[in-house]
Each structure stands twice: as structure tokens, then as C-alpha cells.
Image (cartoon, rainbow, N blue to C red):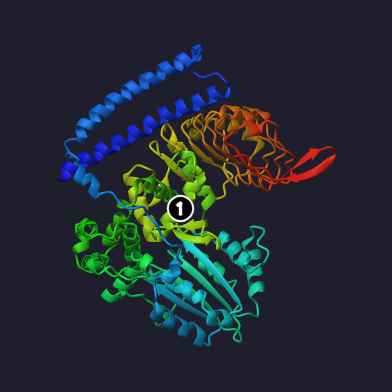
Amino acid sequence: MKRNNESLKSTLSKLDELIYEADNVITDCQIREDYLRMKGNPSCLFPSPREIFFRYNTRKKLTELNKEIVTMHQKLRAFVGPITEQSRSDHISSRWTSHVFDQTLIVELSEDTRKIKEWILSHSESLHLVGIVGMGGLGKTTIVQKIYNDRQVNVRFQKKVWVSVSQTYDDLSMMKGILKQLNADDSGTDKRDLLNRIRVALSHKSYLIVMDDVWSFDDGWWDRISSGLPKFKEHNSCIIITSRNEDVVKRMGATESRIHRPRLLDDEESWSLFCKVAFLSTKGKCNTQLEEVGREIVRKCHGLPLAIKTTGGMLSSKPQSLGEWTRICENFREKLVSDCVSNISVMASLQLSYDELPSHLKQCILCFSIYPGDHEIEAEHLVRWWVGEGLVRGDDTETATYVAFNYLSELVSRCLVEAVQRSNFDGRVYSCKMPDMVRDMTILVAEDKMFCNFDRGRLIATVNSRHLGVTKETTFQSLAGNSKLRALLLTTTNSTGFNRKIALAEIKTLRVLDLSCVKLDNIWLLDLWQWITSLMQLAYLNLRDVANLEEIPGSVRKLRGLQILVLRECKELKRLPTSITTLPRLAILDVRGCPSFSCLPQGLSGLSHLKVDSRYRVRQQQKLVTLVRSWH
């Protein structure tokens, strides 16, 4: 059995490779066809020698792919039986719909919040530390969110600060984040100066600081930050720390009597939570026919709130039929049947939520794996990545961007993604992040699917990398020989130099390139643009808030596959080349917040798919006129 599983896994991995290769060939054909059509020279009429050569190479690639697909089909028949009409109909599900809901209201942890509120409201120390400790998914952050937003707590403390620490902490960023929340000056990099500003902003005030998701006490970061916190007897302040590691909380100063350990939910609490999520459309009222199998599913979540919520979110999208729920119940991994609670069983319950996702969401959710833990992601960046890589497609009635935002909302409603900011008007998500345990599961799946590569949970660049999130620790030399990389995104501010000798310069397969907030150096600017304009399949280029970017070179015309170009908040950007009007697939041009930018080049209106997102000035008859234009 184990040998068969390994053989199937290897076969499916090769099938993924074939799909990627076929997609590359099809994309090349589509880009070329769009370009020729724009020139008014359809490829079917009088093909040039270059066109004939392109067709010859394409035919050769497709012939090889077809041979490999036939071989793959024969191998897969050994694992998959014949598909009957009955088995096909058993998997047809109804259209998925859901109400927008506030996830922080789902878990009623009144016992926990009441206990901790008593601790922080009744203490008399100048600075009181409270710890909340437990495994991922127990609801530690949810408990603190309830306290942080409590009316009595808001009255009690004059200042409040929330710091998300996570595994990739940086005390300089934390100090700046604290100052920003205190509406104080956060400029500069001198830590002593920043700490002094924190002390001044909090002096003679009662304050509450939450240090959420602390993983480590190494290198003395907490000692440095805590030394800047004022301690006045007349102003009783409090720090709440959440962590999976009890030793970390104690070393930070919390005493045993002030450490709270959230418990697992009992059977009735688990069932109550599950019903609120799984039967959201009926306000938590369970279908009596499903109660027995539903309770069995809930028991396999072992009282862990996150596992219950994600499982309930998944089932809310399924038909409320006994057969479907029984199938899902039987589909839980064998390790879920054991009585013990372990990370393995939690991963299995979360894995099931991934397995039950519709195919169009599976690739989308894997994109979260490249971001650091507890990283707040701009929804606009995320959906543009999905569109650029072709994970989302529009049609005659809905644009790809509109569909992508709906996909994101669906992931939020399934409790797999947390909405950090969203519109009060229509519920649209502005920023989001992924819960820790869900991210851990996503990393396991992403590595198994060869979506990206990890070393002990840390994203790394390798010769087989397909997607890469770049941090300050990323080294590009290990990309040497890579011919698979499709997306490269800066997930932290970076000013690393670029030249034609580094391994990254040899990569030609990118569909998505996000260099937002990078600082350009004129020394390597020419090399960078030569590399970018060699990316023939590049569909999404993000240069938002790039320092020292004054103009886009005319060679941008080579990017015939470019669909999205983001130049937002480029302070020094002055002009765009007229050659940009020759990009047949350009659909989004974002030049908002570019104060030095004067006007758009003539001819953009000839691009039928283009939407220009901007507020810019056009000189006309000696007058400056502010315009907002949009082409669809």
C-alpha cells in the first residue's frame, strides 16, 4: 500500500509538471496571437519566417507533450477505476453562498475573557503582565481581541497598542509599529531614540499592550523594548502576552498565578460552535437528520476551536444531505479517531478543509504559504497575483479582478483566511492574513504539491522553486539553473542590488514580479530593466512605491503578455513611454499617488481591455485639468 501511494504521488507530480509545461505553450500562443491581431496581421495570413519558426517549435513541443500525456493516462488507469454517471453525480454540489460574518463573534469564550478581565482591571501594580498559553488554534488571539475591544477595558486604559510578534520578529519594526499606533513620530532607525519616544508617548498614562503570538525570547529583544516602557504607581498598566511556549511567557515576566491556559471545548460547546458556522444560513439551527453524523465529525476535531470552525466552514458550502456528510465523516484521516489531541490530528482536520475546496480555490490558498507568519497581506496585491498567474479568469460579465475578490471572500467565509480590514458597505476584503495553524497546513500542502520549497518551515529558493517570497534572508544563488519560477514577490522591504551576474538574472519564466517598495540604484538599473523586459510571459509587474524610479524605458514594449502594471506611489515617476500603447493585453495601469507624473501617453484608448486607475493632470490649452479616466 505504501509503495502504491508513493508511486501515485510520483505520477501526480509528473502530471503537474506536464500541466505547467502545457500552460506555458498555450500562453505563448495566446500572447503571440494577441500581438499579431493588434498589428492587424493575423497569423493565418502570409506568415513571416519568424512566425513559421515559432509554429514549428510549438508543434514540436505539443507533439512531445501529447506523447507524455498518453503515457501518463496509461499509468493513472492503474490507480483510478472507471467513472460512472452515478459516481459523477454524487460529487455535484450546489452553488456556494454565504453571509458575511464577523469571525471574532463566533467563539463565545466568556469564561476565559471574564477571568482575564478581572486580572487586568483589579490589579494595583504599576505594570502587570498576563500570559495566555496554549497550542495553536485554541483561541488565544480571539480571547485577547475580545478583551482589547471590551468597553470597560477601553475606559480603564488611556492608550492601547497591539503588537503581532510571530516567528519573524524584528524589534526595530516593533518599535516603529508601537509609535505609529501611539500617533507618535516613527522616523529613523536609532533604537535608543525610538525607545525614548515610546517612553514619552506613554508617560503619565495608563496603557494596555498586547504582545500576540510570541515564539522566542532570544537575542534580548524583549529586554530592549520593555526597558522603554514607563512604570508609574499612579497609572496601573498591563501587558498581555500570547504564546504557544509557556517558558517564553514566564521569561518575559508573567508569574504562574497570572498565566491562563485556554481549555479545549467540551462536546456541547464544540457542537454549539460547529452549528453557528456550519448552519450559518439558518442562524445555527441544525438539520435534525444531520445531527448524529455532525456530532461524530465534531468529536474528531477534539474540541479545538480552529479545527471546528474550519470544518464547519467547509461543511457550510456542502449540500445538507446525509449521504454527503457521511462521506465526509468517513473521509477523516485514521489518526483523527484516536482520543489524544495532537498537532497531527489538527493538521488532518485542516487538511480536510483544503481537500474539500473547489479546484479554483486550491491554487489560490497555496499562495498564502510564501508570506511570513502573521503577515498582513493587501488584498489588491494578492488578487492581482492570482490574475497575473492565470489562477483566476474573467468572462464577458465579470472581470478577473472581480472574480478574484469573490474567491478571497469565499476563503474568508470558510474560516481559512482572516479578514483584517473590510468594507462596511459591501464586505469587500481590503487586507487579510492566515491563522497560524491554517498556514502550517498550507505550507505542508504547498511543499507536497511542489508549489514552493521549505526548509523546516522556512521558505527557501531552490532550482525547483515555482513561487518565491523574498525576505532579507533570501539568497538567489541557489536559483541557478531554475527554469520553473513563475512568481517572485518581495514580502519585506528590500534594497538588495541586482546585476546580470546573479542567478536571478538567468530566470526567464516569471509570470508575476512584485518589486514594490524596493530602492533602485542607478548602478544596476540598466541591468534590471534588461532582465525585466526579457520576461516574455510576464503578466503582472508591481513597482509600487519604488524609490528613484523616474521613467519606464521604451523597451517595455517587449512585454507583450503584460496585463497589470502597477506604478502607484512612485514619487519620482515623471512619464511613461509611448510604446506602452503597443501592449495588447494590458488591462490595468495603476498610477495613483505619483505627484511628479504629468500625463498619460496618447493612444491608450486604443487598448480595448485597459482600465487606467489614476488621478493625474493633463496640460491642455495652458490649463491644468484634473481627470480621472477609465477604459473598459
Closest to the observer, 137 or 428: 428
Tell me residue 223's x, y (percent). 53, 69
Picture quadrant where residue 553 is located: top right
Disc 1 on helix, strand or loop? Answer: helix
Residue placed at 60% from the left, 47% from the top? 517
Tell me residue 308's x, y (percent). 32, 66
Residue placed at 40% from the left, 21% from the top? 58
Picture quadrant where residue 197 is located: bottom right
281 in relation to 90, above or below: below
Residue placed at 34% from the left, 49% from the top? 358
Instruction: Characterize the local packing of mark 1: few (<14), some (14-19) or many (20 or more) Cα atoms within 10 angstroms.
Output: many
Is residue 70 left or right of 599 when viewed as pictured? left
Residue type pointed to by label 1: Leu
Q: Is residue 474 visible?
A: no
Closest to the observer, 519 or 154: 154
Tell me residue 200's x, y (percent). 67, 73
Residue to which mark 1 is pinned: 408
